[in-house]
Image (tube, coloured by chain):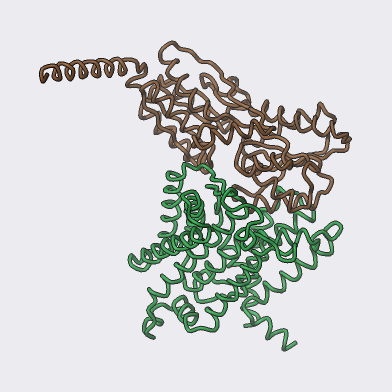
Chain colours: A brown, B green
Amino acid sequence: MKRAWIVVLVISLLVFSASWVVAQEAKPAEGMYFRLVTHGGDDPFWAVVQKGANDAAKELGCRVDIDLCGGDLALQQKRFQEAVALKPQGIALVINDDTAWDKPVEDALAQGIPVIGMNNDDSQGAAGNARLCYIGQSEKAAAYRLARKLFDTAKAKGIDLSKAHVAMAAEVPGANYAKIRSSGVIEAMGEYGITSYEIIDAGGLEMTTVEARETSYLLAHPETTFLIGLGGICTDRLTASLKAAGRNPGEVIAGGFDTTPDTLNGIREGYITATIDQQQYLQGYFAVYVLYLYNKYGFTPNIDTGGYLVDSPDKIALIEKLSPLHVR
Amino acid sequence: MERFTKFLRQRAASTFLVFVGLVIIFSLFSPRHVFINARNIAALGKLFPDLGVVALGVGMLMICGEFDLSVASVLPFCAYIFARSLYVGIAPVWGMVLAILVGCGLGWINGFLTVKTRMPSFITTLGTLMFWRGILYVWSQMMPLGIRQYIPTGSSFEKVFAGTIVGFFPVQSLWFALFAVVLGVLLHYHRFGNWVYATGDNRDAARAMGINTDWVKTLCFVIVGALCGFVACMQSVRIGSFAATQGIGMELRSIAACVVGGTSLRGGVGSMSGVTLGALTIPILDNGLILLRVPVFGITAFIGLATILFVVLNTYVERRFR
């Protein structure tokens, strides 16, 4: 009996060891190291990107680190140089400036370090920066899609779009995301015959300041037909601002980006028509996979990860289910 | 004329005059006089206390000769404690008590570091500003936490901290007024206030008078922490969630509000009425300029310019009339 137990134990150990070895062998990117150099920092958006990158690294068996530079371009450039010095198998870089990244990326590529773009690209794409490929939401396409949704909603309500006024609130008006997203909205405006618009400096990332500026703007500009939050915080504060300015649900047609709790509540209450979920988990996840595949096969695919339009209760339910898991 | 000169000798007099001037200009010249529209006043009354309450504490600390830059991190840290406590089943009232106690604790750490190491508080609180925000990012993973399911709109807790009185007047303004009065009495009519002024004006002399300046400074830091804890909860109840971006930029705006209100950066000079006016003036300037349809892109530049002009005006009035 004792002998049988020993045999069972030995077989179990062998099976466990074999499966462990097989599992270890199944990790294809063992020993590889990738780095994500981003301008992100202060918001939940980047926690989800990080989760996507970590999940991919776990699956592939590689190591990945993410730099969050809080919008500080100089710091981000320093982090990029440090990443290059570490000689990783690849870097995914947020290209948040059209000129600042041209030379650093060329230098890194010359040293044999693959650099891909993620989340934000040069406004000229591959023509503006030597990065190998880009993974992320096409900001302009997402904004264009959102704007069309809002304008169609207005049209269905019988609003005369030739007299409509579009206000776009941006936390950091000069930042690439705001410039590119607003250009998508403006392109859609042209198709619907809308000519009047203004970009509002919402005063930064602090929610009370954003809410105060949006509210003041609505009170000063009763002609506002559309209010679009170009960033997640501006979108989050839309509902409170519309309520404070005494607007009824749907009176001003509002929409924006990201899926914070108050944005989703705003859609439920009818104050917000739609918001764009960037599906940023995929940006982190695919960045790691693409760098691995580039090292193995030389693939350089451009991947559009976004603009999932959230505009109905079932889509809200999906987001709310996955949000605690840091996936949406 | 003599009365006017006497009035101008008051520290916050010039701020008061400019404040009244701004109110008159914005009321007269905003389209449809929207500045004095009930909705605009309600929106202002609801939003300015977030900065205002913190500025009251920061003002007292500045009079004591110290700065607290960490308010921008202590506030979201306390907001996270509050939201997390709700998620683990703690009642909102006790969650708020916990958040305020944590704020006091973080304030005490600032005070302890400053008085024991003799480092300038600008440096110690710059360090804790970054430290606590970093800890918050790691802990919260920067994910928002909705709290509407624990504090529904219309619940008594929501009404007390984010409701309205007679269906119009935001309760946040009353909280601000309460804190302004309590801290004003403490600063101007209690011996602790004398110790604060003495410590800020000349620390060595204050010590020679038998004042425990370390204790006074630490207590001022604790008051700032407690106010951050309170505002964290009040703001979270209003926005219905915790957000990692709460409080960003508040460290400089609270100092700007105090400076506009006539508080000296060198300590020993300032008043609670001045800080109150400063905390009111900056949001009103921001609001009024937008209502005047000044291009919103230029507002920040106007605020910066106004802050400088206020200091110049205060200095001029001080030299001319005091």
Residue farthest top in this picture = A297
For residue A316, what is the image quadrant? top right
Query: Residue pushed farthest bottom?
Result: B2
* Image position of A308 with respect to B44: above or below: above
Residue A224: x percent and y percent? 81, 44
- Residue B86 visible at all: yes
Residue at image point 40% right, 22% down: A59
Q: Quadrant of residue A254?
A: top right
Q: Quadrant of the N terminus of chain A?
A: top left
Using the image as rendered, state which of residue A266 and residue A230 is in the foreground. Answer: A266
Q: In the rendered image, which quarter is residue B284 located in?
A: bottom right
**Left or right: A173 in relation to A167:** left
Measuring from the top left, give residue B161's x and y in whole percent: 61, 61
Left/right placement of residue A65 relative to residue A5 reads right
User: Which of the pair B202/A47 is nearer the observer?
Assistant: A47
Residue B147, given in percent of the width and then of the height, sits at 56, 49
Q: Residue at x 42, y 48 (%)?
A: B135
Which residue is at a point 52% across and 79% down the rendered structure image? B186
Q: Percent from the top left, x then y, of residue B280?
A: 66, 66
Q: Relative to residue B42, is residue B179 depicted above or below?
A: below
> In this rendering, would B295 be left or right of A134?
right
